[in-house]
């Protein structure tokens, strides 16, 4: 229970900076950010791609249950779908805060530009969100109906969320399973395409050597799945009776994570190796910034040590059979992925596209150096807090456990 | 009397095909009539040999367009030529290049930025732009700037700045466009007359070119063989930046 308590304290503490940050954002706009015109995207965009990846990745893990019927992972199927649901709107919040005119967000639907990867990404985001929400409801429907009779808040929340459904028969449950089976297949395709398109959004920018690569969309999809697996290894050791109940499952997730981390290493090495060999000056500058720039520790300590070496050392050794250490490795790689996301966005933008631009005018908004301002940190940390609180609330009020497992029914599918 | 060789079915088929063909042709005729043909290709030829690095163009642009801090529709860089034998700086004024294939246009998720059919100037619809800054990221020439809402300090009597951009005369107001939008050089299109022409003699000419002390910035219609810019391109060797990206800028440099 102590882990869960720490989770809640962190989450609620995070709501304070969120409130302060939102107030500043609403009253003063974005003047207090350290963004500029050379580095127009920063911490919040990195946070968006992190959360988008987390969401799609968690969903792919759930597809192991609802599409591929991996029974060992069945107990966390719903938890995985729920993790996808919690991460998605927070990603949207990060983007909204970042937009110059967030009140015009709906323009994307109204004036949709077919040739813009960003427009496609938003379409995939929306479709994914809809499919996941509907699937999640069908996953929980029977348990929500059953939970209506629970006294107190839980019963009332369940009653509202059941949306008037009262069906508790087995026939109803098998219909639910059929719906889930179809939606899970559609959702899996979207969960792969969505982060791929996020990568595509960066990959198509031919003037940014650091991004302009066919591998980029693939790296995004892969790192999404890896971060999703890490997230589930971590939360399943905290929630739903924690690591004691999920021993085998967490160890399995640890093995999956280990494989994905090595795949990630392979792709990253290919990406950086090819770029450096070709000796493209802008690419070289970006890589040097990542490795030996002022924020070298984000790469060497965050990505390499905490995000890769320590998790691999744990997962590949006998420690990988202890769910507590697997959870620790998962936490490490989740931290590493933060560094990965930051090191995609900022160093890609920092090399100046016109030599001498930042010396041509002396202006903090025309600078290749970017470090998030206190205001940006407040909101970023606050959004993490909100994520924790939403997740905790869901765990409290939603039937995420396996009281009445709906799927898998291999014969049906 | 011989029976007609054309069956009813064939007749209907041919009629249908004819109708389709007619409608396509008619559609094209309508499109041709309603879409104005390209009248101009405004562009610049910038003679770096004549630039003295005074940066009057930067100031003239700021005054003309009333741009806030952090937004520069033109800048003057002073870097030595890469691979050159000296470290003597080359002064280079750099407005938006109004590319023939602008990379900033297709990435906009809401069609807020586009290349004008009539004269090729790349513009931003401030009321459409959501401020995602993808265009700024995609521009290979750093020609686009984000307006984060910073302001210069003026005496209260001066009032809020009014920008003539796009002939919209917007009063700078917190939270209102163009604050929060992507902004860029427009070749001072607000100085065009109703027919879309500039007039150098009466001062209706892009501010940077008008003010250039060394006569380094030449502006004009690249499609008009008699224009100064066309003549310079014929007589001198001009370069464009980052040709390898296929953007086809309409701003040329003479080294």
Image (cartoon, coloured by chain):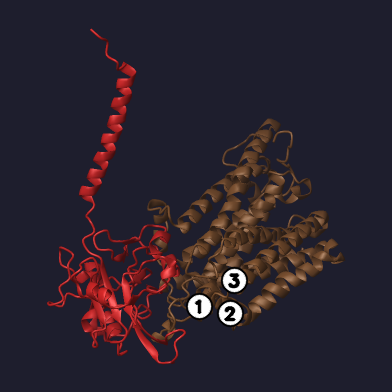
Chain colours: A brown, B red
Labels 2 and 1 touching (C-beta < 8 A): yes
The numbered mark, 3 or 1, whose residue comes first in the sequence reads 3
For the N terminus of chain A, the quadrant is bottom right
- The crowd level at tag 2 (other Cα within 10 Å; few <14, some 14-19, many 20+) is many
* Residue A351: assigned label: 1
Residue A86's spot in the image, x, y percent?
60, 57
- The crowd level at tag 1 (other Cα within 10 Å; few <14, some 14-19, many 20+) is many
* Residue A275: assigned label: 3
Q: Image point 63% across, 43% down: which residue? A: A185
Residue sitting nearer the eye, B232 or B194:
B232
Labels 3 and 2 touching (C-beta < 8 A): no
Residue B232's spot in the image, x, y percent?
25, 76
Report the number of discs.
Answer: 3
The numbered mark, 2 or 1, whose residue comes first in the sequence reads 2
Residue A398's spot in the image, x, y percent?
66, 50
Residue A238 visible at all: no
Residue position for label 2: A289
Residue A109 horizontal side relative to residue B254, left or right: right
């Amino acid at each position: 229970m102590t882990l869960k308590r720490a989770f809640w304290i962190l989450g609620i503490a995070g709501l304070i900076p969120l409130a302060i940050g939102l107030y500043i954002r609403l009253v003063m706009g974005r003047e207090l950010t350290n963004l500029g015109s050379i580095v127009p995207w920063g911490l919040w965009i990195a946070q968006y791609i992190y959360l988008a990846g987390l969401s799609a990745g968690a969903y792919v893990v759930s597809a192991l249950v609802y599409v591929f019927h991996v029974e060992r992972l069945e107990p966390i199927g719903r938890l995985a779908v729920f993790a996808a649901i919690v991460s998605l709107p927070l990603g949207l919040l990060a983007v909204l805060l970042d937009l110059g005119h967030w009140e015009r967000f709906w323009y994307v639907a109204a004036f949709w530009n077919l040739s813009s990867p960003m427009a496609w990404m938003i379409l995939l985001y929306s479709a994914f969100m809809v499919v996941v929400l509907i699937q999640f409801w069908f996953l929980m429907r029977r348990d929500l109906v059953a939970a209506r009779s629970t006294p107190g808040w839980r019963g009332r929340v369940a009653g509202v969320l059941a949306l008037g459904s009262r069906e508790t028969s087995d026939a109803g449950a098998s219909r639910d399973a059929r719906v889930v089976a179809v939606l899970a297949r559609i959702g899996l395709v979207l969960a792969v395409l969505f982060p791929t398109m996020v990568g595509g959004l960066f990959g198509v920018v031919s003037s940014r050597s650091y991004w302009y690569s066919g591998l980029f969309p693939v790296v995004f999809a892969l790192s999404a799945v890896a971060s999703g697996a890490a997230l589930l290894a971590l939360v399943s050791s905290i929630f739903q009776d924690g690591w004691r109940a999920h021993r085998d499952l967490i160890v399995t997730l640890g093995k999956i994570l280990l494989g994905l981390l090595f795949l990630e290493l392979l792709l990253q090495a290919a990406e950086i190796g090819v770029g450096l060999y070709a000796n493209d000056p802008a690419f070289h500058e970006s890589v040097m910034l990542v490795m030996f720039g002022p924020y070298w520790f984000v790469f060497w300590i965050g990505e390499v040590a905490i995000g890769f070496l320590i998790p691999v050392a744990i997962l590949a050794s006998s420690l990988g059979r202890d769910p507590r250490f697997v959870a620790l490795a998962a936490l490490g790689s989740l931290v590493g992925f933060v560094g990965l996301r930051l090191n995609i966005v900022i160093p890609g933008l920092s090399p100046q596209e016109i030599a001498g631009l930042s010396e041509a005018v002396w202006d903090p908004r025309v600078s290749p150096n970017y470090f998030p301002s206190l205001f940006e940190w407040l909101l970023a940390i606050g959004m993490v807090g909100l994520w924790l609180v939403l997740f905790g609330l869901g765990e409290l009020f939603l039937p995420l456990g396996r009281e009445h497992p709906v799927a898998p029914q291999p014969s049906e599918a | 009397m011989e029976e007609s060789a054309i069956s009813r079915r064939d007749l209907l088929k041919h009629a249908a095909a004819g109708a389709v063909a007619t409608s396509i042709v008619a559609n094209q005729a309508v499109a041709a009539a309603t879409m104005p043909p390209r009248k101009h290709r405004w562009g610049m030829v910038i003679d770096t040999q004549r630039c003295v690095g005074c940066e009057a163009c930067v100031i003239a642009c700021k005054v003309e367009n009333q741009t806030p801090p952090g937004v520069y529709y033109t800048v003057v860089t002073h870097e030595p030529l890469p691979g050159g034998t000296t470290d003597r700086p080359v002064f280079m004024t750099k407005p938006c290049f109004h590319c023939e294939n602008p990379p900033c246009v297709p990435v906009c998720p809401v069609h807020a930025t586009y290349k004008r059919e009539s004269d090729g100037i790349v513009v931003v619809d401030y009321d459409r732009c959501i401020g995602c800054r993808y265009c700024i990221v995609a521009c290979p020439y750093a020609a686009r700037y984000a307006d984060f809402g910073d302001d210069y300090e003026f005496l209260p009597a001066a009032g809020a700045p009014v920008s003539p951009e796009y002939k919209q005369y917007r009063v700078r107001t917190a939270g209102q466009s163009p604050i929060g939008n992507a902004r860029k050089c427009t070749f001072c299109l607000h100085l065009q007359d109703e027919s879309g022409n500039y007039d150098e003699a009466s001062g209706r000419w892009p501010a940077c070119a008008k003010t250039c002390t060394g006569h380094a910035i030449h502006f004009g219609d690249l499609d008009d063989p008699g224009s100064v810019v066309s003549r310079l391109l014929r007589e001198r060797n001009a370069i464009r930046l980052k040709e390898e990206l296929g953007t086809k800028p309409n701003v040329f440099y003479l080294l």
